[in-house]
Amino acid sequence: LAVKRSRVRAPLSPPEKPCLCKALFSSNISTVRLRHPVVKQNQGIQALYTLCFYCDFWMRLPFGRRFFEGDIMYGLKTSAAFDSAHFLKDYNGKCANIHGHRWVIEAEISGEELQNDGEKCGMLLDFSDFKASLKSLADEFDHALIIEINSLKENTLNALKVEGFRVIEVPFRPTAENFARYFYQRLSSNRLPVSVVTVYETPQNCACYKEND
């Protein structure tokens, strides 16, 4: 009669010191289960202790920390506002008429490292520099009529300019979506690590723009 032998696993003892997987397991269990090569659904605390070997291995690799945690990012957010008018040519609705908004631009920047020396030590970017960059963009459009190029007849446009009205022509339809992209690209061209720009037409309505890495 053959006797089938089964291996009895000794209980796993907790790690001597906290490991990355323990921190992740306690703070965001779904992230661990999805990302870790060992942890699967409903394996419970026992699986936690089997992770330490893997954590030690993966954390020694350059990309190991990102494998478990994703990108570690700091972020800053600021806003600026301007008052201007626009209209949407060939739009079937009220916005086909000239009307005004208090536009609010909300910009976010992000980065993995803080500055480590000088007066800006511990900062991602000096808020003063960030706010100044965004405010200068907002001021360019303040108290003006913003129109898409070729959306007004030449005689109408010239008449407005003769009367001294400030008219700004842009190479896009002046929607919140297009403005969000425009401001994103302008800030990026100033070498700011922009992650997303949001433009509000009203306190309730806004459009966002961001680009994939």
Image (cartoon, rainbow, N blue to C red):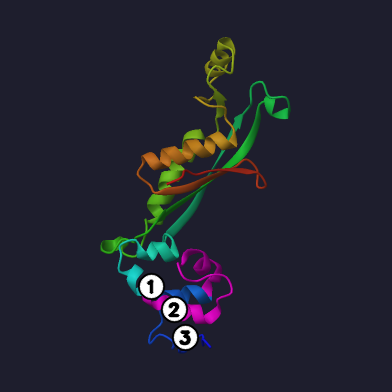
Report the residue that reaches farthest toward the front: 1
User: Are there few (<14), some (14-19), or many (20+) residues within 10 Å of tag 2?
Assistant: some
The disc placed on residue 50 is: 2
Q: Secondary structure at mark 1?
A: helix
Residue 17, picture quadrant: bottom left
User: Are there few (<14), some (14-19), or many (20+) residues within 10 Å of tag 1?
Assistant: some
Q: Which residues are magenta?
A: 27-55
Horizontal and vertical percent for residue 185? 43, 38
- In magenta segment, residue 51: yes
Horizontal and vertical percent for residue 159? 57, 14
Q: Nearer the viewer, residue 47 or 148?
A: 47
Q: Which badge, 3 or 2, is on the more N-terminal residue?
A: 3
User: Are there few (<14), some (14-19), or many (20+) residues within 10 Å of tag 3?
Assistant: few
Tell me the residue that label 3 is attached to. 7
Q: Amino acid at mark 1?
A: Tyr
Alpha-carbon span between mark 1 and mark 3: 23 Å
Horizontal and vertical percent for residue 51? 43, 76
Question: Which residue is pictured at 55% across the width and 23% down the height?
Answer: 148
Q: Amino acid at mark 3?
A: Arg
